[in-house]
Amino acid sequence: MKKAIITGITGQDGAYLAELLLGKGYAVHGTYRRTSSVNFWRIEELGIQNHPNLHLVEYDLTDLGASIALVQKVQPDEIYNLAAQSFVGVSFDQPTTTAQITGLGAVNLLEAIRLINRKIRFYQASTSEMFGKVQTIPQTESTPFYPRSPYGVAKLYAHWMTINYRESYDIFGSSGILFNHESPLRGREFVTRKITDAVAKIKLGQLDCVELGNLDAKRDWGYAKEYVEGMWRMLQADQPDTFVLATNRTETVRDFVRMAFKGAGIEVDFHGQAEGETAVDAATGKTVMRVNPRFYRPAEVELLIGDPAHAKATLGWAPTTTLEQLCQMMVEADLRRNRTGMSF
Ligand code: NDP
Ligand code: GDR
C-alpha cells in the first residue's frame, strides 16, 4: 500500500486529494493545525473522515523539527504540500506570516526529504499568482514571473526551492502552477464562493445585497476535483517537472456574478462604474450587488489565462467541467446548505 502525506487536508484541495488517493488504495496521512475549534467540515462532507486508511496528524508547516519528525514517522512514498496561507488579500496585511508558512514552510519539507529519504516524491502547490502582472498571453511554464502580492512572492520562493532541490539533490520535486480552481468546498473568503453563497442567501431571502471589490479582474477558473487528479499524475510521471493546469478560458468577476445569479433564476442588470457599480434584480429592481473599495487590493492581478498543453501532452490531463457547470454546482450546493442553515 502506497503512503502519502497531504499537508493542509482541511483545505479545499487537501480534502479532494485525500478522497482521490483513498480511492486509489493509498494510506493517507493528512495534516491539520491545532485550532480552538475543529475544521473538518470538508472531509465530513466528502464522507471520508472515518475511512480506515485516513490518518489525521496534527502538524504545523512552519516547524522544521515537526516536519522532520512527520516524514521520519510516516516514511511516505509521496508528499503533497498543499498547506499555505493561501488568501492573497490577507497576505498584504500579514506578509511575514505568509512568507513563513507559504514560502519557508515548503523548504522545511524539502529539508526533511533531503535528510531522511531522497526517493520520496514531492508535489509543491505553485500558483498562477506567480505570473502576476502577466508578460505574455496565455501563460505557460516558460512565461516570466512578476508576482503582485506577498503571497505570490512567497509562492515563487517555494517554487524555485523545489526546482533547486530537484537540481541539487536529485529529489523528485514537481511543481504544479495551478490557475484558480473552485468547487462547493471552496473557502467563503474567495470570490467565487463568496458570490455563490451570497446568491443563495439572497434567493432564500436571508440577505439583501453582497459587496465585492474589483469586478474587472479576469480569472481562468477550473474545477478543483479535476485539478487534484493533475497533482497525482505529476507524481506518477517518469520525470519531475513543472506543469501549468488551467482551462485556457478567462472571464471577469462581473461575468461570474451574472452567471451565479442566473443559476439561481435571477437576471441582473449592471449599472454605474468602478466604485459606484451595482447589480440590480431585473424583476424586482432591488440592488443585489454593490462595489465596496474595502475589497480592493493594494496591487491587483488583472488577467490570468493559462495554457495546459504541456500537462495534456505529458500527463494526459485536460479539464472537462465548464465554468457554467461549475458555477451551477456551487450555487446549488449553497442553496442546499443555506436552506438547512449548515453553511461553512
Ligand atoms: P485552502 O486555503 O483551502 O487550504 C489551505 C490549507 O493549508 C488548510 O488546510 C490550512 O489549514 C493549511 N495551513 C495553513 N497554514 C498552515 C500551517 N502553518 N501549517 C499547516 N497547515 C497550514 O487552500 P486550497 O485548498 O484552495 O489550495 C491548496 C494549495 O494550493 C495552497 O497552497 C494554495 O496556495 C495553492 N493554490 C490554490 C489554488 C486555488 O485556486 N485553490 C491555485 C493555485 C495554488 P487550516 O484549515 O487550519 O487553515
Ligand atoms: P485569487 O482569488 O486572489 O485569484 O487567489 P480570489 O477569489 O480571492 O480573487 C479573485 C479576484 O476577484 C477579485 N475580487 C474579490 N476577491 C475576493 N476574495 N473578495 C471580493 O469581495 C472580491 N471582489 C473582487 C480579487 O481582487 C481578484 O482579482 C486564489 C487563491 O486560491 C490563491 O491561493 C491561488 O494561488 C490563486 O487563486 C490562483
Image (cartoon, grey):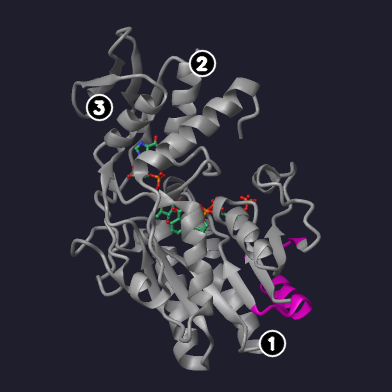
Q: Nearer the viewer, mark 3 or mark 2?
A: 2
Question: 166 or 77: which is nearer to us?
Answer: 77
Range covered by the magenta-colored residues: 55-77
Q: Nearer the viewer, mark 1 or mark 3?
A: 1
Q: Is residue 238 left or right of residue 49?
A: left
Q: Nearer the viewer, mark 1 or mark 2?
A: 2
Question: 20 or 31: which is nearer to us?
Answer: 20
CA–CA distance between discs 1 and 3? 54 Å
- Which residue in the rendered view is the most extreme toward the top? 284
Residue matched to label 1? 116
The disc placed on residue 275 is 3
Q: Does the magenta stretch include residue 207?
A: no
Q: Where does the N terminus fall, quadrant-wise? A: bottom right
Upstream in sequence: badge 1 or badge 2: 1
Upstream in sequence: badge 3 or badge 2: 2
Image quadrant where residue 89 sits: top left
Q: Which residue is drawn at 53% across and 40% down?
A: 184
Q: Which residue is drawn at 19% across and 64% down?
A: 135
CA–CA distance between discs 1 and 2? 54 Å
